[in-house]
Amino acid sequence: MARDKTANLPDETLLVLYAKGDADAARLLMQRLLPRVLGYAGRLLSDRAEAEDVAQDAMLRLWRIAPQWRTGEAQVATWLYRVTTNLCTDRLRGRARRRSMPLDDAPDLADAAAGVEAGLMQADRLSALQTALDCLPERQRQAVVLRHIEGLTNPQIAAVMDIGTEAIESLTARGKRALSAALSGQRMALSFEDEGE
Amino acid sequence: MKANEMTDHDLDSLLAAARTADRAPSPALMARVMADAMALQPKPASRPVLRAAPSRWFDRLAEVFGGGGALAGISFAMLAGVFIGVVRPEPVAALTSALLTGARYEAVELLPGDAALWEETGND
């Protein structure tokens, strides 16, 4: 199928086309979904290399399930976030077991934005945010990242995390409060006083 | 509120910055993901192998007559014969009558008649 025609198709249709042998559909799906999965995994794991491994693994599972994908049952992106969440959870538990928590690798995520002064400030802010996110309990972190960074709706997050929407509201509210607490006292260091309210 | 405390607005702008932060996958990662996709992609269903169709009555008949060409020739001759016999085109009719009316027959008796045999049997 011509690429300009496939560009506007929904993820689910692209997945079906991929399963039928359309290589362009795979490329488009990767361009759409890989950055989201990578960003999400990076926020949960605070480790770029691990996030890349998880993102590749999650996409691999998507390719595998494509021939059996049941149309209309779930959104592809939601399914992929769920797989990514589970993979990240496994990694975090593995880390806890090994008692080696390289959370100070977080600045790597922001290093790409560095370069000029504004970029450095942005990098500092993202680094501080990542450090604060790392302080949150695992489920709160997942909910906050999915809601406030990935931009998913509460029902979508409920599908990803397999809990009710009320629990999601509670998790995100508590998570955001905890995030504020973790960042308290850093307003001047992150130059927010220059921006005002 | 203390001057150094983060406000809700600060936190929201921080989260928004994270949302738009560059998180483009590296070319190496994209290459790995595409390689996985191609390796796991179901191959399009191959075209069915064309097998010889079970022979039909026409094929079997053609075989008897030495192939389709021969059968076509025989069929044409048969149809032509039927046509001539039924329609009797003028040239053919003229030729037939000329041959038949101009013919002279001379009867030659090659075998003796059997009347004598019957007579002898009747005397027994």
Image (cartoon, rainbow, N blue to C red):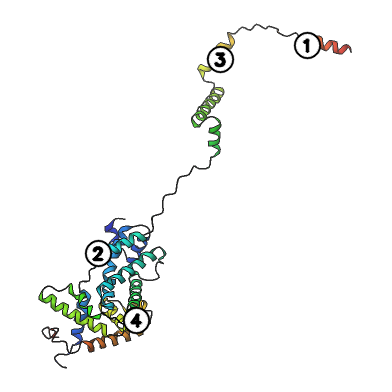
Q: Where residue A21 sits: x, y (%)?
A: 36, 57
Measuring from the top left, give residue B48's x and y in whole percent.
44, 49
**Disc 1 chain ID:** B
Q: Which residue is mark 2?
A: B28
Q: Chain of mark 3?
A: B
Q: Quadrant of residue B78?
A: top right
* Circle 4: residue type: Arg
Disc 3 to disc 2: CB gap under 8 Å = no
The residue drawn where x is 33% and y is 83% is A168
Contact, mark 3 vs mark 4 (Cβ under 8 Å): no
| Mark whose residue sits in front, 1 or 3 | 1
Q: Nearer the viewer, residue B30 or B64?
A: B30
Q: Residue at x 35, y 69 (%)?
A: A76
- Mark nearest the camera among 1 and 2 is 2
| Front: mark 3 or 4 | 4
Q: CA distance from mark 3 to mark 2?
A: 94 Å
Side (left or right) of B85 relative to A195: right
Query: Chain letter of disc 2?
Result: B
Q: Which residue is mark 1?
A: B114
Q: Is residue B42 visible?
A: yes
Q: Residue at x 15, y 77 (%)?
A: A122
Q: Residue under circle 3? A: B96
